Image: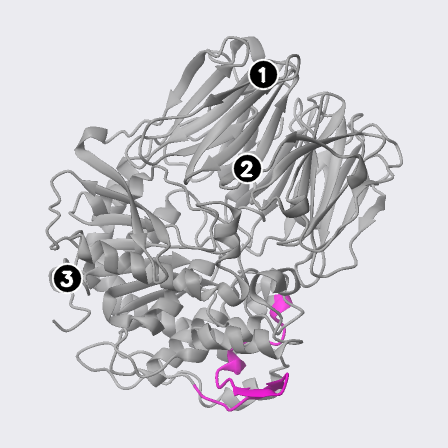
Amino acid sequence: MRLSFLMISAAAVALSTGCTMTDTSSQISQAATATPETPPAASEPAPPVAARIDHEITQVGRTRNDPYNWMKDENWQDVMRDPSVLHQDIRDYLEAENAFTKAALEDPTTALRDELFKEMRGRIKEDDSSVPEIDGPYAYYTRFREGGEYAIIARKPADKAFDDSAEETILLDGDALAEGKEYFSFGGIDTSPDHTLIAYATDTQGSEFYSIRLKNIESGDDLGVHIDSAYGPFEWSSDGKRIFWIHRDENARPDSIWQRDLETGEDTLVYREEDPGVFLSINKSASEEVIFISASSHTTSEVYWFPVDEADPTPRLVAARETDNEYNVAHWDDQFYILTNLDGAVDFKLMRAPMDSTSRDDWEEVIPHRPGTLLLGMQPQKDYLAVMERENGLPRIVIHARKDGSSHTISFEEAAYSLGLDSGYDFETPVLRFEYSSPTTPEQVFDYDLNTHERTLRKTREVPSGHNPEDYIAERLMAPSWDGVDVPITLLRHKTTPVDGSAPMLLYGYGSYGITYPADFRTSRLSLVDRGVVYAIVHPRGSKAKGYQWYLDGKLEKKPNTFKDFIAAGHYLVEQNYTSEGNIVAYGGSAGGLLMGAVANMDPELFGGIIAAVPFVDVVNTMSDESLPLTPPEWPEWGNPLTSAEDYDTILAYSPYDNVADRPYPPMLITGGLSDPRVTYWEPTKWAARLRHDAPDAGPYFLRIEMEGGHGGASGRFEGLKDVALDYAFALAAMGKVDGVKLRED
């Protein structure tokens, strides 16, 4: 049983982190007398004033000044693991920023935030449960108790999987494990092959340093196995006597894979990655016969494998890494099936190779490259191979039969929708599970009989407070960008919201790493849409919404296309009377926060407000610090300003932090997490300080740093809603829809 949906995926969330170049110990001591000075109390709260200390950095023949470099603790690695060691001057400043945001934004919107939270919580089935996953003699699932923040992991006999009255065994109680902790998150969860033990990974800081523990299911006893400094995923050996896990080094980078002997407690090295630009992952094949090790960057991959029952595993290479060649592997029909962009297959093709002869010369084509049809992934069952594809921005599942080579397609008719694959059943069982939703349709879980092509609806997400899809309109639009290219937009509005330019809009965007934001169902959005707000998602270049080339056209020297696409989409929606200029609140997080910072610099008057969550805005400094976990792996995405003057100039030209000027910026809400290893706390902090200094008559700028959390903000399903309520309260205030709260001049 592998409850993978609870894991934090580095691929799905492959986002950036922040840094500066040099040691700051002397600067921090200089800042001791100049850290936040809040002016005397006035009629309105005043933001803290950050010290400015010149800090010149020279590289590739260029020199820049970073006056807020002191905000990065020189012991940031220690802070990730233990926030209490944060330098006091920095802590004082962060707390002063939080105090200002509380006084100037949170307190005046208390009633609205409470109302929003109550609405959003009311749309959540508090005792909800997942559809059971069948694994041998048991059916495994998650559920929540009324009022519970965290998942309960449980099982029941497989033959009673869908019997709600069947007796269950609780394996893990997330609420109990999280008791007394400010932050809690599950990573990997998996039972031993004989179903007697359960291993689970937890993070109690938000730093994504996981600890793996083992528990006897029958007795409930902790087995005293503690594996620390781990990455989230792990795998069992076939005999259940060993665990394969990923080690994170002091810079939070996955650097090696180890085997833990559960009888002796001894760790044995299985694989070490010497290239700091490569990340590691490990996964067991659907057949449970093979364990794969993937060593990959954003553009290059290399896969190793070994039999799951091998006592002293020796990784076998599938094919050696070649720059800009990507591939991933599945085990099916006693062969390896390989998705790859080899030989110019930009949108990927499917190959296969015998297990004993896997060099590229031995690969045989199964599905040819079809430009514009992106192959996204594979899910094998014994006699069938499901392949996820995307064409014209819409996903579909294509089923390939092993026996006769025939194929058929699973698709839907809505204008915009999301589709996801899930195993759900044993490899031997001819049933495929998939999830479907759309902006108007709550999530549905289907079991699909691969022999008969019959769909069984196992679950439709319940919205306790009520939801009528007919009350909403979802649209898919195409906005012409600066160069004539059509940019997809997913749009959701209430049927009563007029299309006459009067409606406010929340405009969401991301557009990096090839990540395509799904056109799915989110109950929280309804709190805006029901108030007459149009919710729109832009799918700019840098995503894979229109294929892999769409991604390539939004990275490196072409990165500005992402920003221009978002701005073009905003203007198009104004032209089409969905909203009006200055009545748009833009929203993006992480690399989407970079997008927010860039468009704020490029076209500030288009927006009435900006929400930048954990924003990657200090791009030059980040990409110049090799010690940060994501910097070397991300040079193929952004460029390397340490070695290339051209890359330096390209990044500097759009880096939000480096391009702040005295512009009419709209009000901004900027958030971060103290333990965030992806976008470090000092990135949003430095940016907010520079905005206030360089554009003091614009804004206002609100900075909120989660002092006990990481990249995802507060943990827990309800605590997280409080963060959303703050975002939406800010958005509504920026739209002029909160009585008594005025963030900008008319």
Mark 1 Cα within 10 Å, few/some/many (few <14, many 20+)?
few
Tell me the kind of residue under disc 3: Gly
Q: Where is residue 585 in the image (x, y as percent from the top left)?
A: 26, 60
Specify the label residue 406 is tagged with.
Answer: 1
Residue closest to the eye, 315 or 250: 315
Going from N to C along the chain, the mark reached first, 3 or 1, is: 1
Q: Which element carries disc 2, helix, strand or loop?
A: loop
Q: Residue at x 60, y 88 (%)?
A: 26
Residue 738 lies within the magenta run: no
Where residue 158 sits, quadrant-wise, is top right
Residue range of the region highlighted in magenta in the rendering? 51-78
The residue labelled by disc 2 is 370
Q: Say which residue appears at 16% left-offset and 60% top-offset.
A: 580
Helix, strand or loop at mark 3 = loop
**Percent of width and height locating residue 143:** 46, 28
Residue 746 sits in quarter = bottom left
Nearer to us in this view, 278 or 218: 278
Eye-nearest disc, 2 or 1:
2
When asked about the image quadrant of residue 598, the answer is bottom left
Q: Can residue 468 be seen in this view?
A: no
Question: In terms of depth relative to the viewer, which is nearer, 337 or 308?
Answer: 337
Residue 214: x and y, percent?
69, 35
Q: Provide the secondary structure element on which disc 1 rests.
A: loop
Judging by the rendered image, the residue that carries numbered circle 3 is: 736
Looking at the image, how many numbered discs can be counted on the residues?
A: 3
Q: What residue type is labelled 2?
A: Arg
The crowd level at tag 3 (other Cα within 10 Å; few <14, some 14-19, many 20+) is some
Residue depicted at x 37% and y 36%: 147
> In the rendered structure, are the residues bearing label 2 and label 1 in contact, judged by CB atoms less than 8 Å apart?
no
Residue 165 coordinates in the image, percent (x, y): 44, 11
Q: How far apart are labels 2 and 3 at the CA level?
A: 48 Å
Separation of residues labelled 3 and 1 (CA atoms): 57 Å
